[in-house]
Structure formats: structure tokens, C-alpha cells
Image: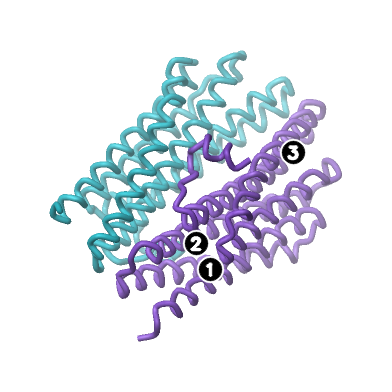
Chain colours: A cyan, B purple
């Protein structure tokens, strides 16, 4: 039987591999949207099965390690965090697929407006995802706090995008269906940011034993 | 130290208490929408803190039980299922709050259309939530399969609702903002159904050791 620490490293590496696949899916989904690039869209759809497969492998590995090593305290917290982060990553992958479906529908129609806000929002969300995984690997609470702070900025961007697109639909009813597609893209990006925030909260709990979920006061204190 | 089985029962009872709060939040959120009942809406908002608090208590209890009893195989699977179900329930609670926010916005404006499809969809979703918890308590795979089957019906209802509301917006631009609110209500109901489906899949894994996530073939075989 290999050493437990080696196996925990293997688990972490698998999570990082999965995170890499998910980050690339998110990035490509936005390229597919902005550049009307059907190849990119198809790449995301093809990679979904691999992400789903990895979720199962990582879950299985975490449960096997729990059963085999009966870990205490810190290692147990790490394993439960890994299970939650795994689930958050898989859902981000699903959300990238949702974005691709909207992108495919939109690339067959004339564009409603130049896309500026959505790529801007996507860039912020991608950096949140990267930081949330970085802070997991480096056990770096400062990065986790940056993720929590960015979540508010993402919500503001989403509000702006909704308002603009609502005005488009009101002014010109022929844009309704395409504007709705863009609203759902923004909504999916916002949900990806929520999952990055979940990961950052799990890392803060793992590193500091502080539970920041639902504690507005504790989150305020981080600002 | 109390007997482990007693403590596992306590954990299950806490999960059921939480499920009761969440089911009532979903039910009231739809009543608030359909009856334009602001009191019901406020009840849901007031109960959110309690649901969030219970999520933390249940997570903590599950982790303490893992650490204290070092459970093997079946009990370990139960504890990891409990952690996942807990997270799904808390998110359903958030989604009920989202519905309430749309209901509060809509009750201040004239209605777009008589609400028939959304209450119909809500009824189906509520029954999925109840069954998913029932199948967890009774370890009854048949109920879990019913939940998986209902998920497709929910998606069909959602598609119908989207199409109708898109037509409303295209025909009369003054309905755009209110129709969007209703579209988001349907979207939130669909996501509640997704969480109930997650729970049913976790229960099937717990009971049968069969992993039905992402396995289209396995799911087909259940039909």
C-alpha cells in the first residue's frame, strides 16, 4: 500500500487535471460565442464526457481513501473538501455546455449587439475559477478572499447586462429570442462564479477552520 | 459516547427536518407568486437563515461522525450521501428565495397571463423533492427511478413555458420585464428538479452501489 500522503497528492493532481479541463471548457465556450466558432463549440461538447468521467473517478478515489486510511481531522477535512470541489467543478463544466448551446443557437442568426460586457464578465469569472483552485493548491487564504470579493463585481456586471438586454427586447421585439440567449449566457457565467465562490469558502474552512458560508458578518470582516 | 446507529439516526432526522423547511419554502414561494401573497413571500425570506444554519449543523455533524467512528463501506457511503444531499437541499432553499424575489417584483405589476403552467410545473417539482427524500429514508430505489423519470417531464414543461413567454414578449414589448421574471421562475423550478434528481442518483448509489450519474445507458435501462 502506498503512503497516504502520496495518495492525497494523486487526488489533488486529479482535481487539478479536472480543473484544467473545466477552465478550458469555460474559455472555449466564450470564444465560441464571441467568434461564432462552431469548432470551439464542438470541442466543448466532446470534452464533457471526459469531465463527467473524471468526477466519478475523483469521488471514488476520495471515498476509497477515507475507507482505507480512516483519516482524522485535517486529512478528513481535505477529503470532504475534495468531494465538494469535485462536484463544483463538474457543474461548472455543465454550465460551459449550456453556454455553448446558446452560442450555437446565436451563431446561426444576425448578432443583436457587439459583445463587450459578456467577454468582460467571462474574463473576471475565469480568473475567479483559476484563483479558487490556486488557493486550494497553495492553501493561500488571501486568494480565497479575492475570489469572495470578485463575486459582488460579477453580480453588478450581470445586472448591467440584464438591463441592457431588457431594453433591447423592449425596443425591438425581433431581438427577444437572441437577447434571451445572451441573458442565459450571463446567468450561466454568474453560476460559474458562484461555484468558484463555493470552492474559495471550502478552502477557507480547510485552511483556517473558519466557516464563512452564510456568515455575512464574517464575510464583511474579510473585506 | 452514544451508539453510532443512534447518531446516524439523528443525522437523518436533521436532514429530514431541513428537507421539511425547504419543501415548505418551495411551496410558499409558488403560493406567493400565484396568490400575490406578500406575507407568504416574507415567510420564505425569514426562514432562509434557519435553512442556512441547518446546513452548517448537518455538515459539522457528518464530519464529526466520520472522524469519531471511522466508519467503513456502507456507513461511510451514507455519510458522504448525507453531505451531498445537505448541499442540494440548501441550494433548493436558495432557489425558492430566488422565486420569491421574482414573485415580489411581479405582485407590484399587472399580471401578464393567468398562471397555469407554472403551478403545474411546481406541483411536479414538489413531488420530485418529496420522493427524493422519501427514497433516501426508505432506501427505496423504485421511488428514486420515478424521480429520474419526472426530470424529463419537467424539462418539457419548461420548454413550453419558455416558448409561450417568448411569444408574449415578441407580441407586446411592454411584457418583457414581467415575462422575464416568469421565465426565471420556471428556470429556478427546473434547477430545484435537478437537485432532486441529484439526490435520487445519490440514493441509488447508496442503495445499489450503482453510479447512474452521466450514464445515459444506465438511465435508459431504468425507463
- Eyeballing the image, is A77 above or below A60? below
Quadrant in the picture for residue A153: top left
- Mark 3 and mark 2 lie on one chain; the one further toward the N terminus is 2
**Residue plotted at (55% across, 38% down):** A187
The chain containing the residue under callout 2 comes to: B
Q: Which residue is mark 2?
A: B86
Q: Position of residue A204 (x, y in %)?
A: 31, 58
The chain containing the residue under callout 1 comes to: B
Q: How far apart are labels 3 and 1 at the CA level?
A: 35 Å
Q: Which residue is mark 3?
A: B179
Pointers 3 and 2 in contact (C-beta within 8 Å): no
- SS class of the residue under badge 2? helix
Q: Position of residue B55 (x, y in %)?
A: 48, 66
Answer yes or no: is residue A219 visible: no
Answer yes or no: is residue A121 visible: yes
- Eyeballing the image, is B77 above or below A198? below
Q: Position of residue B99 (x, y in %)?
A: 67, 52
- SS class of the residue under badge 1? helix
Q: Which is more toward the observer, B202 or B14?
A: B202
Pointers 1 and 2 in contact (C-beta within 8 Å): yes
Q: Quadrant of the C terminus of chain A?
A: bottom left
The chain containing the residue under callout 3 comes to: B
Amino acid at each position: 500500500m502506498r503512503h497516504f500522503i502520496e495518495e492525497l497528492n494523486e487526488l489533488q493532481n486529479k482535481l487539478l487535471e479536472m480543473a484544467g479541463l473545466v477552465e478550458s471548457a469555460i474559455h472555449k465556450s466564450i470564444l465560441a460565442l464571441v467568434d461564432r466558432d462552431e469548432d470551439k463549440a464542438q470541442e466543448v461538447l466532446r470534452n464533457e464526457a471526459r469531465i463527467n468521467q473524471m468526477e466519478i473517478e475523483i469521488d471514488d478515489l476520495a471515498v476509497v481513501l477515507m475507507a482505507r486510511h480512516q483519516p482524522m481531522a485535517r486529512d478528513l477535512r481535505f477529503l470532504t473538501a475534495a468531494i465538494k470541489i469535485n462536484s463544483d467543478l463538474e457543474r461548472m463544466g455543465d454550465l460551459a455546455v449550456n453556454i455553448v448551446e446558446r452560442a450555437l443557437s446565436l451563431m446561426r442568426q444576425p448578432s443583436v449587439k457587439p459583445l463587450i460586457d459578456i467577454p468582460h464578465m467571462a474574463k473576471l469569472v475565469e480568473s475567479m475559477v483559476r484563483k479558487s483552485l490556486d488557493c486550494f493548491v497553495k492553501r493561500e487564504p488571501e486568494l480565497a478572499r479575492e475570489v469572495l470579493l470578485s463575486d459582488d463585481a460579477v453580480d453588478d456586471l450581470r445586472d448591467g447586462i440584464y438591463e441592457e438586454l431588457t431594453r433591447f427586447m423592449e425596443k425591438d421585439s425581433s431581438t427577444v429570442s437572441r437577447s434571451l440567449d445572451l441573458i442565459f449566457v450571463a446567468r450561466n457565467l454568474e453560476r460559474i462564479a458562484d461555484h468558484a465562490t463555493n470552492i474559495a469558502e471550502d478552502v477557507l474552512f480547510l485552511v483556517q477552520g473558519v466557516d464563512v458560508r452564510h456568515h455575512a458578518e464574517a464575510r464583511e470582516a474579510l473585506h
